[in-house]
Image (tube, rainbow, N blue to C red):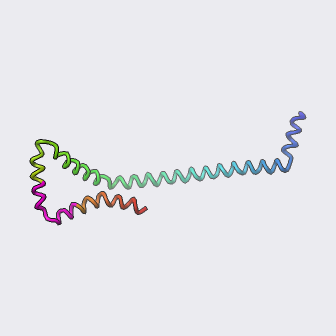
Amino acid sequence: MIQFLGLAKLFSNPITKYVGEKVIGYFEHKTEVLKNERVAEIEASKSVQVQQILSSEKSWKDEYLTIVFTCVLVAHFIPPAMPFMEQGWELLKSAPSEFWWVILTIVSGSFGMNIMDKFKK
């Protein structure tokens, strides 16, 4: 019982009360800061998810062009397709420069514009 009275005196001391209030205030503040950070993280993850959904709407064009160019590259190494690939390149040598500008515009428009969207931010 005497030990309990010693603790009662300790807690009734103004300095102890002041320190206790500061410690409790610190932990309340820290809890509030952590709560606000977590809310900000959740909001940021929502905006990232929305951006991923919006980006995926355009990605099929990029994937299509990647598949086409990959097929052209692979066809050069398939023996039955080799003569046709060689004939195709011979025909493309006579293609007008405007044709190449259109191809360049299509490819850079698909791949390049998505890269530009990332740099705008």
Please identify the quadrant where the C terminus is shown. Answer: bottom left
| Residue 86 percent across, percent down from the top left | 11, 51
Q: Residue at x 35, y 58 (%)?
A: 115
The residue lying at 85 percent from left, 39 percent from top is 7
- The answer to whether 68 appears left or right of 79 in the picture is right
**Residue 97 magenta-drawn?**
yes
Establish if 14 lies above or below 105: above
Q: How many marks?
A: 0
Q: Residue at x 29, y 58 (%)?
A: 110
- Image position, residue 59 (x, y; %): 32, 53
Q: Residue furthest right?
A: 2
Residues in magenta, as a range: 89-103
In the displayed structure image, the side of residue 116 where residue 79 appears, left or right? left
Q: What's the magenta bit mostly, secondary-structure-wise? A: helix
The residue shown at (13%, 58%) is 92
Q: 27 left or right of 110? A: right
- Percent x, y of residue 111: 30, 57
Outermost residue toward the bottom? 98
Indicate yes or no whether the magenta region holds residue 114. no
Position in image of residue 116 (x %, y %): 36, 61
Q: Is residue 111 left or right of residue 99?
A: right
Residues 99 and 93: in front is: 93
- Above or below, 5 relative to 89: above
* Residue 74 position (above or below residue 88): above
> The N terminus appears in which quarter of the rendering?
top right
Is 47 or 102 nearer to us in this picture?
A: 102
